[in-house]
Image (cartoon, rainbow, N blue to C red):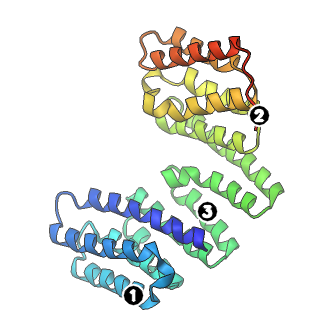
Amino acid sequence: MRKVLLTFVIIFVSIYVVFSFLGRKSDYVLEKKLWKINQELGEYAKDPLSVPDRAFIEVAERCNALVSKYDQSRLKPVLRITSARAYMYAKEYKTAREQLELVISENKENQMMGSQALADIGRTYALEENSEAVLATYQRMLNEFPLTSLGLSTPLYIAKYYADKGLLAKASSAYDNAVLHYQKIADEHKGTLLGINAQKLIGTCYNAQQKWDEAINIFKEILLESPPELMTIQSSSAVVRSVNRVAIVKLNSFDIPIEIYEEFIKRNPGHELNPHFQSLIDGFIELKNKNVKVKTK
């Protein structure tokens, strides 16, 4: 329970991002009111167990009143989500879900907002320790919002959910299914950031299964087969870290990353990543020549 509550504190950061995005050109008065409410709710969230449930319900009711007053505002869905989260803290999970379902039904064209609301619905079921409903919500996310950031992560969440419950056979099967799901997306969106992100998630699944050879192959494929213009320092940083970790720590090989980075430089002369890769190559060659051994974990 403590972990879930901490998660909610972190999640409140996202409401500011959505809120700022929606209200940046209008709704100034409402924006100030909503900012104040979120500040208050954020303070309560720091130690929610010490705050009376009624205080959270009052926050939710203030949001509901603003929804009625500013019914045409673009901030309306943010108000509903804030209201739902306040209800969650008050353990009014059914009422929270009602607010979140309204967000989904009233914003059918906004996949980001809908997926966020559905994720919060899943959290209400998690707080109620209703495993069947949590899994049903995951499936709903896959059906309704499959290509959003949250939807893309859902097959991995399902596998982790089973793993956390100690259901290892189901977790293993879920990871296998996730790989198939992500490979289908990668194939359908080859050469795009969406396809690359799906490949990264395949690598995450292989890491979780300790399938190190498969993991290094998918990370190698991302670096060498993706359009070079999509391999920026930012987009490739996690992949490079994974290559280094899997190759050196898990497979005890400096040769693998050296070969991958040399091949990248050969294929992509003048690429912005090349100086970084050359630095890594030089460092790994030095460690290899010194016969440094990395202990596997």
Between circles 1 and 3, the one closer to the viewer is: 1
Q: Circle 1: is it few (<14), some (14-19), or many (20+) Cα within 10 Å?
A: some
**Tally of marks:** 3
Distance, label 1 to label 3, CA atoms, is: 31 Å
Per the image, label 3 sits on a secondary structure element best described as: helix
Residue 25 placement (x, y as % from top left)? 17, 57
* Amino acid type, callout 2: Thr
User: Residue tagged by mark 2?
Assistant: 296
Q: Which mark is residue 45?
A: none
**Residue drawn at (52%, 67%), measured in percent from left and top?**
6
- 248 relative position to 43: left or right: right
Measured as percent of width and height from the top left, residue 167 is found at 80, 61
Q: Which numbered tag is attached to residue 55?
A: 1
Of marks 1 and 3, which one's residue comes earlier in the chain?
1
Asked if residue 292 shows in the view, the reply is yes
In the rendered structure, which amino acid carries the disc numbered 1? Ala
Instruction: Indicate the position of residue 78 as horizontal and vertical percent values.
Output: 34, 68
* 2 vs 1, front mark: 2
Amino acid beneath label 3:
Tyr
Mark 1 secondary-structure assignment: helix
The residue that disc 3 covers is: 138
Query: Measuring 55% from the left and 19% from the top, which residue is drawn there?
Result: 280
Please say if 89 is above or below 203.
Answer: below
Question: Which of the pair 200/113 is nearer the observer?
Answer: 200
Q: Is residue 115 above or below residue 4?
A: above
Measure how far apart labels 2 and 1 are at the Cα level.
51 Å
